[in-house]
Image (spheres, rainbow, N blue to C red):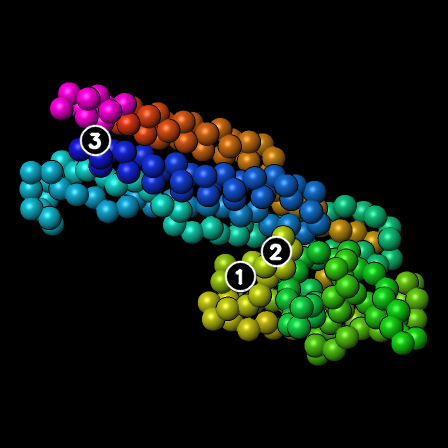
Amino acid sequence: MMISSFYTAATGTINLQKGFDVTANNIANVSTTGYKTSESSFADLMYTNIDAAQGANTKLKSGHGVKLKKTDTVFQPGGLKQTDRPLDYALTANNEFFAVQTDGKVKYTRDGNFHLSLENGINYLTSADKGYVLDARGQKITLNSEDDSPAIGIFSFQNTDGLVREGSSYFTPSNNSGAATALTNAEVKKGSLENSAVDLADQMVSVIELQRAFQLNSKIVQVSDEIMQTVNGLR
């Protein structure tokens, strides 16, 4: 039983640390334009019946710790910040994204902090990391100057929860999200950016909850180890 408690608590500490990592990443991106909060979910590991056959209906069960079941992206809108910069764009609806060609593939983002990039005498509209911003047909956008009003492609997905996060601001489609669909009547605010959707107060509550759970599991590991040492010393 002591060995079981030791490994159960150790499993808890390891997976709670993963939860800490998710929360810490949210806090680190509290000022990242268009960032969406990640939320960790935990699940119990297998239970073992005590003094009863497996599968029997009994209240006497021994747990085996927890695991980080999944990490979901919470697609809540962030507040809009007016910048008056001509190449800043903000989306008003939550299920809308800009398309950016970067790292050899098309990714989708809520970050509308765009720039001009001069290549071979042509000005391309690019993201902050030099990816090409695309129009509704998936073509690179060219401009003559920052004062132009290009037709930026706005895309939506049937199921945003199925999108796969890549880095802080990018998402890629999956079978669960469905393919990107170009929108024709999306509202875009020029001269504005979408703030990070991270609520710092919520993240601090998460830190406290994870910290207390981590301390409890660590204490159980310590107590189990001390008991095992005492038992071994009696031999």
Which amino acid does the dot numbered 3 rest on? Met
The disc label shown at residue 2, or none: 3
Camera-side residue of 29 and 78: 29
Residue at image position (45%, 39%) is 17
The picture places residue 208, in percent across and down from the top left corner, at 49, 28
Q: State if disc 3 and disc 2 touch (CB < 8 Å).
A: no
Which amino acid is tagged 2?
A: Gly
Q: Is residue 52 left or right of residue 100?
A: left
**Residue corresponding to mark 2:** 167
How far apart are the alpha carbons under marks 2 and 3? Answer: 41 Å
Asked if residue 190 can be seen in this view, the reply is no
Q: Is mark 2 on a helix, strand or loop?
A: loop
Q: Which amino acid does label 1 sit on?
A: Val
Of marks 1 and 3, which one's residue comes earlier in the chain?
3
Q: Where is residue 221 in the image (x, y as percent from the top left)?
A: 32, 29
Per the rendered image, the range of residues in magenta is 226-235
What kind of element bears circle 3? Answer: helix
Please name the residue that numbered disc 1 is placed on: 164
